[in-house]
Image (cartoon, grey):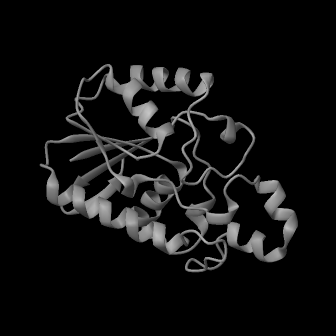
């Protein structure tokens, strides 16, 4: 099985580095153009299934990509961005100046800490791991699956596949409409 993961296109919140979390924020003009560009790249893959997050920015991106494939889009909320709770609608810079505790949470010093009334890193990791196991059960080895999701879930996938239970992978920048290719062969996920 081959899995192609794409982060949604840009939103105005991405541009200003504001935590979106699970808010319904649409793509901006640049984000729609990015989705069209990534759709052109993805035409080379024989995609058999498309899944996307339930958040509008991911759904819009998936719909633009799907114009090339005309497949049903399966919405799965396990692909949603992390729930940032009270951090939503605040900029990273604003939060970093509030206290050392907030800086440490953003740096993911403690994976199960959740003082901002949303999901902990561990909660998100468990949700993504559950979804990846679901794909293995649900799909055939010949399937080529497209996932349209967010930066947080993509970082979790990288961490799960590489077996990283520390914070190193959590700091990786993932650009809007960046592509991550994953294979599932011999009962193992690998990054292609």
Which is more toward the observer, 185 or 31? 31
User: In the image, what residue occupies the spot 61% across and 80% down?
Assistant: 113
User: In the image, what residue occupies the spot 61% across and 76% down?
Assistant: 114
User: In the image, what residue occupies the spot 51% across and 34% down?
Assistant: 177
How far across and down, in percent of the image, does residue 108 sit?
64, 71
Q: Please indicate whether residue 127 sits to the left or right of residue 155 in the image.
A: left
Which is more toward the observer, 14 or 137? 14
| Quadrant in the rendering for residue 44 | top left
Vertical comparison of 21 with 114: above or below: above
How far across and down, in percent of the image, does residue 17 sit?
73, 46
Q: Please indicate whether residue 18 sits to the left or right of residue 147 in the image.
A: right
Residue 7 in view: no
Vertical comparison of 68 with 77: above or below: above
| Quadrant in the rendering for residue 163 | bottom left
Vertical comparison of 75 with 171: above or below: above
How far across and down, in percent of the image, does residue 57 sit?
51, 38
């Amino acid at each position: 099985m081959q899995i192609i993961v794409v982060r949604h296109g840009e939103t105005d919140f991405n541009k200003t580095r504001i935590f979106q979390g699970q808010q319904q924020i649409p793509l901006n003009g640049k984000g729609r153009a990015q989705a069209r560009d990534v759709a052109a790249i993805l035409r080379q893959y024989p995609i058999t299934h498309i899944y996307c997050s339930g958040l509008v920015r991911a759904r819009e991106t998936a719909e633009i990509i799907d114009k090339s494939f005309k497949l049903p889009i399966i919405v799965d909320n396990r692909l949603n961005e992390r729930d940032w709770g009270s951090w939503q609608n605040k900029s990273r810079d604003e939060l970093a100046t509030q206290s050392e505790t907030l800086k440490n949470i953003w740096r993911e010093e403690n994976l199960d800490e959740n003082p901002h009334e949303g999901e902990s890193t561990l909660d998100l990791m468990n949700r993504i791991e559950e979804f990846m196991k679901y794909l293995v059960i649900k799909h055939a080895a010949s399937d080529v699956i497209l996932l349209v999701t967010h930066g947080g879930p993509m970082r979790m996938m990288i961490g799960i596949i590489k077996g990283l239970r520390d914070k190193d992978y959590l700091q990786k920048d993932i650009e809007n409409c960046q592509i991550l290719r994953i294979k599932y062969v011999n009962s193992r996920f690998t990054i292609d």
